[in-house]
Image: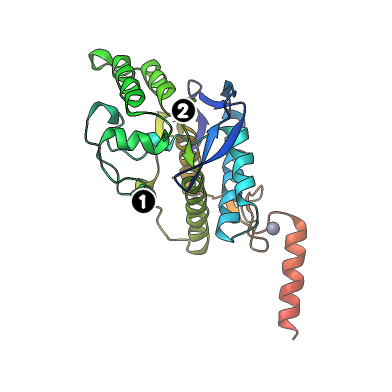
Amino acid sequence: MNFNYSMGEDSQLYKYSEYVIKEIEERKYIFPADNAQIQESNINEKVTDVLIELLDVGKSVYFNEIDVEGQVMDFVSKYGLFGFINYFPVNELYFIDNEIVLKEDKMIDEYLIKADVISYIRIFMPNLLNQDIVDKIVTAKENIKANRITENSKMLINMNFAFSHDYGEPLEMITKYAKQLYEDLMQIQNEEDSELNTNDFATLFESKNGKELVLKYETLKNAMDAVFVSEVMAEVRKLKICRYCDKPFLAVNPKAEYDIPACKNKANVYKFRSKNT
Ligand SMILES: [Zn+2]
């Protein structure tokens, strides 16, 4: 399958002007800074570049490079948090039920002791009192009155949760996600016939006509997943990992194996030497 895609124009992400790391119960979180202002984050024009930056974070995690934390902070400062809170529940309106049903995903197991909705929301809003969380749930329910879920009501719900000033994400959840994407790409590159388990991705496609797909997203994770899946499933895959320096890159020439000429030269020297010793 080969298709062109564009980012949905009504997809709007939000971020804060500044983020900080806070330690809560021995876990590092990234939160908006106390005085940070919410702002629109438009990634439509550069969504593939944003994915490459995220894969580069994944590479640093994979190879245990120094200052992964600084790299994650740079990324979040530019593009905001991922909105993982929307991803794990089976029901996208998870706050309606008292008990929450989660997708099978290793990433969340270690955080959740009880499967009730308040415990779940607390993973991402660990500084709130129970009553504050209950109030947020009530507001979110009001936003979908009469069971009508519109684009606007979804946005209002996200303002209560994923884009809220109280919302944070565990640093380790972000590094695991970035590493998983990098490993998936590595596996696809190394075993050309390996199949991607698309169940692991939160993609929202809307087909215009047979070959034109509009990617819709309401969180950064949606956007990254959608672009990743489209790039790796393309008939001619241009998203690659350099065979010399392991950096993720988007190849201009689909046959390219190296991100920059210097890597190709070094790889050739290396091959030459190993042949001649
Ligand atoms: Zn390279």
Figure check: 71 above or below 266:
above
Q: Is residue 48 above or below residue 13?
A: below
The mark nearer the N terminus, 2 or 1, is: 1
Check disc 2: other Cα within 10 Å, few if <14, some if 14-19, many if 20+.
Answer: some
Image side of residue 37 versus residue 192, left or right: right
Residue topped by disc 2: 166
Q: Amino acid at mark 1?
A: Glu
Residue hosting label 1: 110
Helix or strand or loop: what does disc 2 sit on?
loop
Q: Residue at x 50, y 39 (%)?
A: 224
Label 1 crowd bin: few (<14), some (14–19), many (20+), radius 10 Å: few
What kind of residue is marked 2? Asp
Residue 162 is marked as none
State the SS at label 1: loop
The answer to whether residue 241 of the structure is visible from this angle is yes
Inspect this view and state whether residue 238 appears.
Answer: no
Report whether 16 appears left or right of 84: right
Q: Residue 252 appears at what percent x and percent y? A: 66, 47
* Above or below 121: residue 136: above
Q: Residue at x 29, y 46 (%)?
A: 113
Q: Nearer the viewer, residue 212 or 156?
A: 156
Mark 1 residue CB less than 8 A from any atom of ligand 1:
no
Q: Confirm or deny contact between disc 2 and disc 1 (CB under 8 A).
A: no
Query: Residue 104, percent across and down?
Result: 30, 49
User: Residue at coordinates 51% horizontally, 64% vertically from top-left?
Assistant: 190
Q: Quadrant of the N terminus?
A: top left
